[in-house]
Image: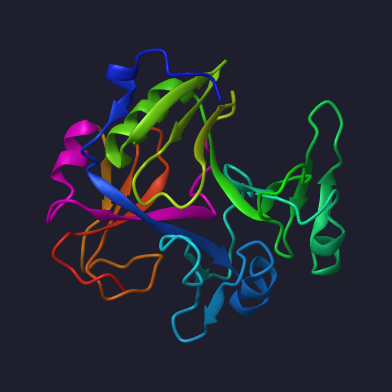
Amino acid sequence: MQAPMNEELSRYVVPLAQFDGLALQAEDPRRIASFWHHNLPDSRYDAARLRLDPSPLRARAEILRLLPTSRLASDPARVHVDIRLPGGDPTALLAAGATVVREPGTDPWWVLADPEGNQFCGFPSVDERPAGVFELVVKCRDAHSLAFWWGRVLGGAVAHEGEAAVVSGAPDFPWDYMVFDPVPEPRKGPNRLHWHLILRDSDPLELVKLGATVLRRPGEPMPCPTTDGHWMLADPEGNEFCAVPADRDIP
């Protein structure tokens, strides 16, 4: 990764929220949980709560919530994860139900899809680092601006990678990077994959001041079934995320 262009401006030491895992739409949550267990090492499936929880040896926020739905959002890759494969190719994942969307070419990684078509990138293992998720990718129109926005919310350093940008070192973020990848296409609607935050404050006012939009308030119907009184917000490019107030118990 390239060094940040301005360390003073690109590192935020007092985050407004902490990362608290992902939420993925699923027509068959049990089937999708079984598949994603292969990419979240030693995770445990909680059938009552419809979520994969990390083992004690993994980061606390490496959570995957499954959101039952009869109609998946149309874009399977606007927000996705990149994984390190458990070897030089995705044979094990293909046996578990993945399909190949694109083989390596100019870009030396596979584009794969899980059994419900959710796309992710698989990178061949080249060193001793463990297999599994290593970054969260958000496709967007203005990668640099959105990276700085999320750097302010989560903390960490923002680095430029040509037209792309990354946030790294954010407290409680469970993977190496949050990547913002520029694309010309606008969003087509809600993302299949979104993420959860725990707010520093009792409400998201500071995020709204920065440019977040309130989509749903506590007590209103939510895509994530929960009783924790959370908010559903969108970042400046419309990417949805859920936010639990600081005075609530973490579910």
Specify whether 133 is left or right of 125: left
Query: Which of the image's four quarters has the N terminus?
Result: top right
Q: Position of residue 201 (x, y in %)?
A: 13, 52
Look at 62% across and 79% down and name the residue there. 30
Look at 59% across and 60% down and name the residue there. 72
Look at 44% across and 21% down and name the residue there. 144
Q: Which residues are magenta?
A: 187-210
Colour convention = rainbow
The answer to whether residue 142 of the structure is visible from this angle is no
Please identify the quarter of the rendering in which residue 124 is found.
Answer: top right
Q: Is 119 in front, or is 130?
A: 130
Specify whether 184 is left or right of 126: left
The image shows residue 148, relative to residue 126, as above or below, that is: above
The image shows residue 12, relative to residue 229, as above or below, that is: above
The answer to whether residue 5 of the structure is visible from this angle is yes
Residue at the outermost top position = 5
Query: Which of the image's four quarters has the C terminus?
Result: bottom left
Q: Position of residue 163 (x, y in %)?
A: 55, 17
Q: Is residue 190 magenta?
A: yes
Look at 52% across and 42% down and name the residue there. 176
Q: Is residue 111 magenta?
A: no
The image shows residue 242, relative to residue 183, as above or below, that is: below
Q: Is 103 in front, or is 134?
A: 134
